[in-house]
Amino acid sequence: MRLPLGARRAVVILSAALAIPAATAGTATAEPYKSATTTSVEAQPSPAVVNSTVTYTTTVAKYVGCAGGPVAACGIETLPSGTVSLDREGTPIPGCQDIKLVNGTAVCSSKAPSTPGNTTVNAVYGGDEHYAGSIGHDLLQILAPTPVTARVEPKRVPRRGAVTYSATMSGLQVASAGGAGAADKVEFGTAAFFVDGEALAACAKQPVGPDGVASCGALAPAVGGQHTLKVVYSGAKYSAPGSGEASFEVLAPVADAPAAVDFGPVTVGDRAARAVALTNSGTAALTVGHAAITGGGFAVSADGCSGATVAPGASCEVQVVFAPGAAGGHGATLAFDHEAAVALSGTGVAAPVAPVKPGATIDPARKPTFAVNVPRGSNARASSVPTLSLPLVCPADEECLLDGRLTVERGGARAAAAATTTVARFSKVQVRAGGLKTVKLKLSRAFVKKAQKQGIRRIRATLTINTVLGSGQRITTRQQITLVLPKAKKAAKKQQVRPRFTG
């Protein structure tokens, strides 16, 4: 039996009461009397969507007739037991076979057909020892999902820009929600809008109009790139739910910079420079407010990004220098107005200490005590000066050029004999590598005489030697030496002239 659309009802079929004849000899025991039953079945939801889950509720009751009255006025008792099996136009419904009655009711669920259309559901009650079997029918309408076409206008929109989301539900069947004698209220269902899987609060349950269209206005996402709009249609009485999707693009700049820049090892006191590029890999112009470094050891030496407007696909550069003030690891961050950040790193390396080459010195084979040669006899002319011979040596691997001076110590009672601080000088003395050269110094005659007059034989002095190596390195050394003066020559006694007397 097929019912017209909009007038669906469960069909009840009565079973006939069985009159059991009396037993006769030679035959089996007579069957007991069985009461007539009514069976009804209802499918929910109805209409149902293809491949959705449908629940079937079957009710079996005892039929109680009444004299002279309509069937509708007769009493019904729900007492039968046993099982019920369901089919759709003769095809057994999976999961709904031999369902046991509980207080006259059997419930089962199964998947709806995959083809839209109307189908008859049969519920067959087999009866029990007291009740006769019966059959009930229901008409189940199967609907295909409603086609939903989603749209976004404009399809390319700036981030947080105004955008309109809409959808068209095709092939809607109008259902009346009005009651008898009242004006019909037509319902077309509602649509909900989602962007990237997140529900839009301002676009929930938007009503669908007679033209099958639902829409709402909102702001585009703040994140640039591709996004997806999904519209979910709730369905109506005779229109199945459905959904549709549409993609759109949010235009936005994308600040793309290297995640990290390592300057490597740099000697303390030196500096290294690197160029850090900021590229706009987005779809809209990028305005860079400011580029700044936080952290020690690094600094911006040239800034081509702060305040710049970078077109899509273009770049700007910031020159960064690393000048470690101490040995060890250093780190900092170069930030472009929170659009991008670059981790900076480098290692300070202690400057190598160049080996100090020794300068010229007194021949180490000689003791630092030297005799002063004071001319005497026929050599002690007024122009003659005391001399001091010093054996000087240079480093073994470089020749050297020497100059220097000899000074006496100041202070002390006996040092007062020194009339001047510097008592001798020498210059432009060239010594070959590893060579030995004896330098003859001329001392002040007055200085020596004064010391001898005061009876000073030993004088402490400082020898300062300035060495210029062949490589150009200049080295100054100082050594303490002792000057040994000879005793002063005693003056010859005058002969006493004795008077001679003659007689």
Image (tube, helix red, strand yellow):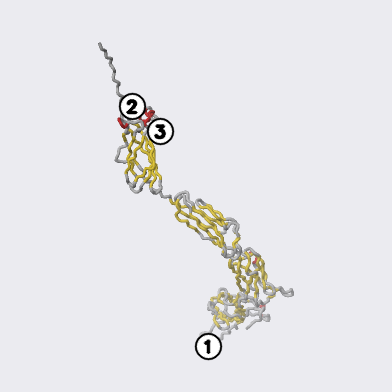
Relative to 147, is 312 above or below? above
C-alpha gap between disc 1 and disc 3: 166 Å
Q: Which disc number belongs to residue 24?
A: 1
| Between 14 and 148, the one nearer to me in the picture | 148
Q: Amino acid at mark 3?
A: Thr
C-alpha gap between disc 1 and disc 2: 178 Å
Q: Residue furthest left?
A: 503
Instruction: Please indicate, yes or no, whether residue 314 appears anywhere in the rendered image.
Output: yes
Nearer to us: label 1 or label 3: 3
Q: Secondary structure at mark 2?
A: loop
Name the side, left or right, on which 123 lies relative to 411: right
Classed neighbour count for the residue bearing mark 1: other residues with Cα under 10 Å, few (<14), some (14–19), many (≥20): few
The quarter of the rendered structure image containing the C terminus is top left
Callout 3 touching callout 2 (CB < 8 Å): no
**Where does label 2 land, which residue?**
455
**Where does label 3 land, which residue?**
421
Q: Amino acid at mark 1?
A: Thr
Classed neighbour count for the residue bearing mark 2: other residues with Cα under 10 Å, few (<14), some (14–19), many (≥20): some
Callout 1 touching callout 3 (CB < 8 Å): no
Instruction: Please indicate, yes or no, whether residue 484 appears anywhere in the rendered image.
Output: no
Q: Secondary structure at mark 1?
A: loop
Mark 1 vs mark 2: which is more N-terminal?
Answer: 1
C-alpha gap between disc 3 and disc 2: 19 Å
Name the side, left or right, on which 493 lies relative to 264: left
Q: Who's the residue at 51% across and 60% down the image? A: 258
**Which quarter of the picture shows residue 489?**
top left
The x, y position of residue 314, in whole percent, is 57, 64
Q: Who's the residue at 28% across and 16% down the image? A: 498
